[in-house]
Image (tube, helix red, strand yellow):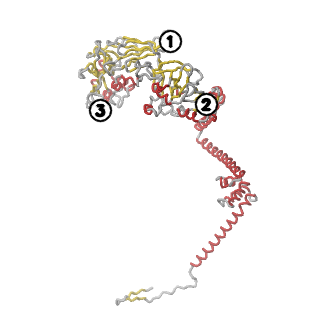
Amino acid sequence: MFRYLMLAVLVVAGALNAHAWETLNDKNFDSTVRDGGCVSKTDFERCVSARPIFVRTDEGPSVKRYLLASHGVTTAELEAMLDELGVSTSVYVDYVWDNEGGRGRKHIDSVAEQTVLFGLMAEDGTTELAPPIYKKVWPVSDKLILVRRLNLGWGFITPGDPASFRALDFPWDNWDWYFGNQASLPSMIMFRSKSTTPGLLKYTVINTDGEPSTTIDRVKPTKGDGKPFAINRSGYLGFPVRTEDGADTTVFLNVKTRDIERADPTFEFVPVGWRITGEYDLDVGRKGFTFTPMEKVGTISSGHGIISGGMYMPLDDWDSALKPNPEADEQKIIGIVPIYLPDEYQNVRGWITVHGDDTRRWYKLVAHAPEEDARGKEQVGEKDELDPTDIIRYAKYFPPVADIWIGSADEAKYREQFRNADPRDVPPPEQRVVVRLFDDPDHPETSGMTDWVSTGNDLHRRAIEKAYDTDISTMKTHPSDPQALITNGVILTAVVNAGQNKDDREYREMTPAQRQAREAQREANYQAVLARVQVSMADEILQSGRSVREYVNFYAVAKRHGGKYLRAYWQEYGHLPDIADSGEICNRFGQNSEECRLVWPKAQAYYAEEKAKSDREAQRYAREQADRRPDPNWNRPSKSKEPRCYNNYDGTETCFSD
C-alpha cells in the first residue's frame, strides 16, 4: 500500500547507498567495503560505490555516476591540500577535534589517518570526474558536481576540472538530494533558506547548470527537524505554503520536470506517534513520531473533549488503485480525527474514525492494530502501527459508539482540590474515555443510544467491548455531561497519587536519621492500625457466636486486651499456647487481676510439676553418682616382691614382678 514518505524514508525511495555515504568515515569504512557497499570487497583504501546515482542531462536520458571514497591519505598529501586552500594545519586539526570527533594524539598525523575524502566516477566506473579531495560530493547533472572542500567552502565544479570551482552565489542554509536510484527519476538537489516572510521558509531547485530554476516560497515549517514537504515515489514533492493574503494552500513540484504542476489538495503534517501500550504508559524510547501529510476534509464538532479540530484523510497519490477506500466493508468513513494527549503525549496516539453522513454520524476509537488482521498482526508494537491509511482498513474490527468524549476533570474543581498543595506533588489530571453506546451496535444507522458511560483510561478496544458486555443498569451514567461523570473519580485518583508524591518527595529531602525515625514511626502506626483491625475482627467473632478458632489472630487480641477475649480463648482451649505468656499477662494486668487469676493457677501447677520433675531427676543423678564412688574400706593388696611366672608350654616361662 502506498505511503507518503518523509525524509527519513526518502532515501529508500531515492539513493539508498548514497545515504550511507553521508555518514561514511574511517570507523565504518572497512565494514562498508566488506558488506558490499563498494565494487571491491578487498580494497580498504579506495571505494567505488556499488550502486549508481542517476543524474540529469540536457538531452533528456539520465546517466549514471558512482560515488568515490578514499581512506588513507598521507600527512604530506593532506598538508599539501590544506596549503593549496590557504588553511592552517593547526586550525584544521582543531576543527576536526571539535566537530568530527578526532581521536588519539591531537596532531595532523592522526587527522590524516582518520580522514576519508570523496570524489566521483563516470558511468564506466573507472574514469574520475572528481578526484577524492573533497569532504562531500554530490552529482547535480552530467556537467555539474556539488562539492565541499577542506576549507568547508561549498561550490560547483565541472566534471574533470577541479580548478573550475565556483562558490554558491545564492542564499541557503541547508540542502538535500532526492531520488536518483532509477533512470526515470534522476537525482534532484534543492536548497533551503529563510523566506522574506518571517517564520516561513523558501526552497530553491537548481537546473543542470547550477542556476535556480524553481522557487517555492512561504513554506510552512514543521516543529523540530521535520521536513516541511511530502514526497511520493511517483515523483512529486508537496509543499504546504501560506499565500500573501494569509491563506493556507499546497503546491506540488514534479521532480521530473522541476516545475510546479498543481496547487491542491491542501494538506497538513500530522505527527503520528507510537501507540499507547495501556493506561497511558509509554514504552521507553517511544516518544518519537513521523510527520504524515494528510488532507483536511473538515472539522469535528465541539463537545468531544480533547478530540477537536481537523478531520483528515490520507492524501490521494494520483493512483486510485492504491488509494484507501473509506467505503469498503460498508464503513462509510468520512474522516479520521487524531487523538492528541496532553504533555509528553502530544503526538498522535490514536484516531477517531468518523462514519455516516451529514444527517447521522457515529464513531470508532482505533488506537492499535487488530491482531486478527494479517497486516495488523505484523504492525503491533511497530512504529507505523497508527499509520492513517491502515487505520481506515482496520476500522471494521472495532466496535462503534454513538458519541465519544475524551478528557479529564473539571479544571476549576481540580485546581480547588489542590489549592493548598505543593505544586511539585500535584499530578496532571488523568484522561478518561466516555462514550454513548448503541442499543444495537450492529445497526448504528438506526439504533438508539445509552446515556454517557465511562470506559476508563484504556484506549484499547477491549474497554469499549467490555462496556457492551456489561449490564448498563449496573454502570454509573450521566444523561448529558460526560465530564461531570468522571470528575470526582479523576480527582480521587489524583489525591491518592499526590499523597504518594508528597511522601516520596519528603523522603528524598530527609537526612538518614530522619528517614530512620520516620520508618520507626510508620512501623508503630502500622502496628496500631493492625491492632485495631484485629480487635474489630475478634469482636465480630464474639458477637456472631462463632468459634475463636476461626480467627488466627484471636489469641494476639486476647493476650493484649485480656477481659472477654482472654476468657473466650481460655474457654475454648483451656490453656495458653506458650505457658511463659502467663507471666507476661500477670505483669501486664497485675497479680490480683482477673486475667492473672485465670491463667496463673495452670501455670503454677505446670511450674510445680516441672520443679518436681527436676527434683526427681536431681535425686536420681545423685544416686547414680554415689554408686560410682569407690568403697573407702577397700584396701589394695600390697605389692609382692616375688616374681610371677607363666608357663609358655614350650619348655619356657615368662616372669613379671611388681
In the rendered image, which quarter contains the C terminus? bottom left
> In front: 383, or 436?
436
How crowded pointer 1 is (Cα within 10 Å; few <14, some 14-19, many 20+) is rated as few
Task: Give the CA distance from mark 1 to mark 3.
Answer: 53 Å
Percent position (x, y) of residue 403?
58, 26
Between tags 2 and 1, which lies in front?
Answer: 2
Q: What amino acid is labelled 2 in the image?
A: Val
Q: Quadrant of residue 325?
A: top left
In the rendered image, which quarter contains the N terminus? top left
Secondary structure category for the residue under label 2: strand
| Furthest residue in direction top, as rendered | 245
Task: Give the CA distance from mark 2 to mark 3.
Answer: 61 Å
Any part of residue 500 in sight: yes
**Mark carried by residue 453:** 2
Q: Earlier in the sequence, mark 2 or mark 1?
A: 1
Any part of residue 80 in sight: no
Q: What amino acid is labelled 3 in the image?
A: Arg
**Mark carried by residue 247:** 1
Percent position (x, y) of residue 635?
54, 85
Secondary structure category for the residue under label 3: helix
Percent position (x, y) of residue 588?
71, 55
Q: Is residue 4 left or right of residue 302?
A: left
Q: What amino acid is labelled 1 in the image?
A: Ala
Q: Which residue is mark 3?
A: 34
How crowded pointer 2 is (Cα within 10 Å; few <14, some 14-19, many 20+) is rated as many
Q: Quadrant of residue 53?
A: top left
Q: Is residue 42 left or right of residue 203?
A: left
Where 619 falls versus 455 (above or below)? below
Percent position (x, y) of residue 216?
42, 12
Q: Earlier in the sequence, mark 1 or mark 3?
A: 3
> In front: 528, or 305?
305
> In front: 105, or 214?
214
